[in-house]
Image (cartoon, coloured by chain):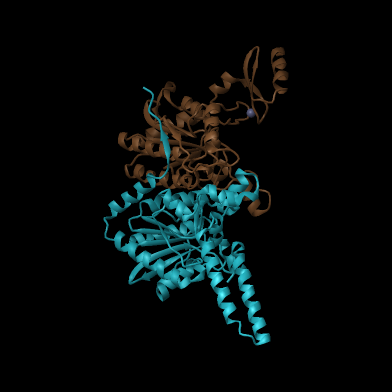
Chain colours: A cyan, B brown
Amino acid sequence: MILLDFEKPIAELQEQIEKAKQIGEKTKVDISGTVTELEKRIETVRTDLFANLTPWQKVQISRHPERPYTLNYINAICGDSFVEFHGDRTVKDDKAIVGGFGSIDGQTVMIIGHQKGHNTKTRQLRNFGMANPEGYRKALRLMKLAEKFNKPVVTLIDTPGAFPGLEAEERGQAEAIARNLFEMAKLRVPIICIIIGEGASGGALGIGIGDKVLMLEYTWYSVISPESCSSILWRSWDFKEKAAECLHLTADDMLHQKLIDGIIKEPFGGAHNDPDMMFKTVKEVIIKHLAKLTPMDADKRIEKRINKFCDMGVVKELEPKS
Amino acid sequence: MSWFKRIKTGITTSTVEKKETPEGLWFKCPSCKNIMTTTEHELQSYVCVTCNYHSRIGSEEYFKVLFDDNDFEELNPELESADPLKFTDTKAYTDRLVATMEKTQLKDAIRTAIGNIDEQNCVIACMDFSFIGGSMGSVVGEKIARSIDYCVANKTPLLIISKSGGARMMEAAYSLMQMAKTSAKLTQLAAAGIPYISLMTDPTTGGVTASFSMLGDLNIAEPEALIGFAGPRVVKETIGKDLPKGFQTAEFVLEHGFLDLIVDRRQLKPTISKLLKLFAN
Ligand SMILES: [Zn+2]
């Protein structure tokens, strides 16, 4: 397990355990009491750390290199039933967004998500989860396919942003995202969106319009990453912790602002500490929400979805001058 | 000719575009450095007669250019930005708002109004770049949403004039969700069969481009306007080399298939008028 910088006290205790074990082996002295004691301390320290996580630390957990990504969820939730579909039918197949039909508890679902890589090679292949316009257009094509055959849509969001490249601009990154917002708002089948890692700006929102928008406990969702916010507003990269606070980007913040519909609890220490538990929880949440959304009248569901997004925002309305 | 030369010397020593001279106000084109009277410049819809340079103008000027006799009724002029996140960077958001309102005499980065364009009813939602870079916060989203409600209720076409650097960072995720809000709202306008013309002006980047600006039944733009998702500086950093000439200009965006037409601002009113007529009849 890779430990994050703020988990350093845990790493130190783990080191002490290792040392104690080595000494025990060398000297044939029973050190099991010491080890148990240290293991208990680790649990206390970890509990303390996770009870008081700062927004920036949550951002770090959302980016943990061992965190499960979209295909891990799909394979665990849909098993062998999943068939990946490729391509936007116009330009190419964007590897930063994956999607296809899969079965959840006997119900066929179109499941789509940003895909990151777990090593240098796959990270490049997946473009670090930063989609080009083709990715968003593939996602829309698959959602339209789901709509045609009356299958619900589940999207898994995990991106540091839409790719800001030259070809992305040439092929209309802005139009691709805008089109998705428009089409998802009126898609006739239920949509559940789950932020499983990073929810950065338009790149996240591009597959993020749903009847239920949910965030895993240690994820973030905002208009900009804390680093970029720091560099723009403070003209320095050094204010990322402060920016993370100011942006109010954690799941708790987002629920409080009424910009998401719910939070999915993660296993102790984060999704990567117990991926199987995480997959099970997410699967249960999807089943629970689909059971409520599916019987609804499509027009009513769409109206509710649109009204929910239209209620977002805070303005001051002064009395008109008479 | 002697008076002209005298004025010209006076103008070139100045760094500002406008300068009061004994003979009146003069405008110096920042692109070709030619000068004309401000009256002439205004008559030309703030376009340079020599090089066609389109000066950045705001809602006040666009309303003047487009509405018959500059006669219009502003919709929801009383809306102002709140500060739901108590956001403070190098300056408190509330202080920034107060200072900007004072400086610009505007309430936020967009004004919405109903009036006539060649005797045809039209709602215009026009962004003001001078208000925190035309950034989209809750007020921009709400005013667009209410304009759409007005258009649906009164069967009035909608013209949105975009001029924005993108999101209002001080409203964080609220700002992001205005993309969702305006796009979702546009589905209702579409369902009502009411035309929506999107005019993109210099600059139209970020969150607005990736939502309502690119969703027009017709997407039009002013010549040479910067239009894109990511800003040119960000793209340049990403690819690690210089950007090709004309990258992200209106002409570039049209060539790549995302604009219906580019309109010289002096032809804007007759063009919009013609389009409204074509939609109506
Ligand atoms: Zn000129």
Choose between B155 and B98: the one closer to the eye.
Answer: B98
**Rendered position, A44 above or below A301:** below
Q: Position of residue A236 (x, y in %)?
A: 65, 47
Ligand 1 falls in which quarter? Answer: top right
Q: Position of residue B65 (x, y in %)?
A: 48, 26
Q: Position of residue A222 (x, y in %)?
A: 50, 51
Determine the residue positioned at 61% across, 45% down: A232
Q: Is residue B4 left or right of residue B164?
A: right
Image quadrant where residue B42 sits: top right
**Rendered position, A294 above or below A241:** below
Determine the residue positioned at 46% across, 60% down: A217
Q: Can residue A25 be seen by looking at this rendering?
A: yes
Q: Residue furthest bottom?
A: A28
Give the quarter of the figure containing the N terminus of chain B.
Answer: top right
Choose between A244 and A94: the one closer to the eye.
Answer: A244
Q: Can residue A180 be seen by looking at this rendering?
A: no
Q: Is residue B145 left or right of residue A201?
A: left
Determine the residue positioned at 62% across, 21% down: B36
Image quadrant where residue B143 sits: top left
Choose between A150 and A161: the one closer to the eye.
Answer: A161
Q: Position of residue B48 (x, y in %)?
A: 60, 27
Q: How many marks?
A: 0
Image quadrant where residue B13 sits: top right
Choose between B21 and A20: the one closer to the eye.
Answer: A20
Give the quarter of the figure containing the C terminus of chain B.
Answer: top left
Q: Is residue A277 left or right of residue A234?
A: left
Determine the residue positioned at 57% across, 72% down: A1
**Rendered position, A9 above or below A36:** above
